[in-house]
Amino acid sequence: MRRFVPSLLRAAQRKKISPLSSTLTKSLRAFSSLNDPTMLDPDYEYERLRTNVTTPEDAVNNILYNTPAVKRGPVQRRTICALVNNHPGVLVQVTGVLAARGFNINSLVVATTEVPDLSRMTITLNVKKGSNVSQAIKQLEGLVEVWAVLDYSETAVVERELLLIKMAHHPPGDDGSEDEVDQKMKRHAHRAAIKSLAEVFKAEVVDVGSQDLTIQLCGKSSRIDNFVKLMKPFGIVESSRSGAMAVPRSRISFEVESEDLKIEEDGVDVTMLPPG
């Protein structure tokens, strides 16, 4: 369907098929623009923002324009976990192997586990399509200080990252030229907007000063990315991220159901079954 829409539009423009209605043409352009941004109709920008539509054509237009395109970029995100000895110089050896193969480390988190002599590294990489990450994993496993290396890229995991972001009390561009009452009202509204957005993301204010406040957020890396983008217009003073940590999701056992099924299967009389 995505391949057929552009050809249908070109054929309609050459009048080789019956003329399409303006609304249907705009819908087709919206659908084709999901993969081809050059097909976007600039005259339809205002219509795509309409709400409380009453006709099926307008409803379809809104749905098509608000459906995000599938991002198939040249860079993929890979998550690797390495279990290593808690010895000096191990971090340099691991990062040296990845750097030698040209991998860009997006984040790296390392800390000791419940065993004092064992450390756990969680590494996220931005790799290009076709990169041979498995060879790098084998090379890491060959290091003396490394016990095992796990690739969580295709595994269901629980991923969390911690963000500490400091926001200014005053909005960007506030030079203090207004009178004191207007400044206080504007800064109060600015702080209220920041706190409201933080509550939507279930973040919490952990420190407040005379000029800024610090917000803490724990969640997926993608969620933190979106939070930072939304906070940027309010004036970010500084931010700090811990990097992604991940553990595999727990398994759900169905042993009880399998035992019940086995009992039912054992109770079947084979002599009553048809031949074959």
Image (cartoon, rainbow, N blue to C red):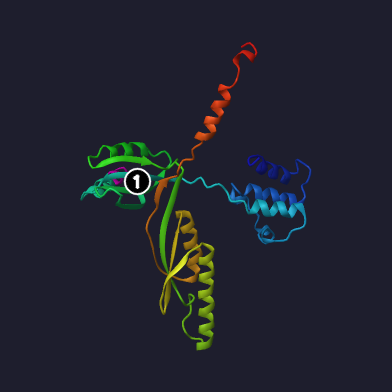
Task: Pinpoint residue 108: horizontal percent, then vertical percent.
Answer: 34, 52
Q: Mark 1: which secondary structure?
A: loop
- Give the position of the N terminus as an image quadrant: top right
In this orientation, which residue lies closer to the viewer: 31 or 53?
Answer: 53
Q: Is residue 190 magenta?
A: no
- On screen, residue 134 above or below 105: above
Q: Relative to residue 193, is residue 274 drawn left or right?
A: right
Task: Pinpoint residue 80: horizontal percent, then vertical percent.
Answer: 37, 44
Identity of the residue drawn at 48% across and 86% down: 177
Task: Pinpoint residue 271: horizontal percent, then vertical percent.
Answer: 61, 13
- Give the position of the C terminus as an image quadrant: top right
- Looking at the image, the residue that sits furthest to the right is 18
Asked which quadrant contains residue 139, the reply is top left
Give amino acid for label 1: Phe
Q: Relative to residue 64, is residue 207 drawn left or right?
A: left
Task: Pinpoint residue 131: horizontal percent, then vertical percent.
Answer: 39, 39
In this orientation, which residue lies closer to the viewer: 196 or 25?
Answer: 196
Query: What residue is shown with label 1?
Result: 103
Q: Relative to residue 237, is residue 146 drawn left or right?
A: left
Q: Relative to residue 35, is residue 128 drawn left or right?
A: left
User: Dot 1: few (<14), some (14–19), or many (≥20) neighbours within 10 Å?
Assistant: some
Asked which quadrant contains residue 274, the reply is top right
Q: Which residues are magenta?
A: 97-103
| Count of all numbered marks drawn on residues in the image | 1
In this orientation, which residue lies closer to the viewer: 61 or 166?
Answer: 166
Identity of the residue drawn at 36% across and 40% down: 150
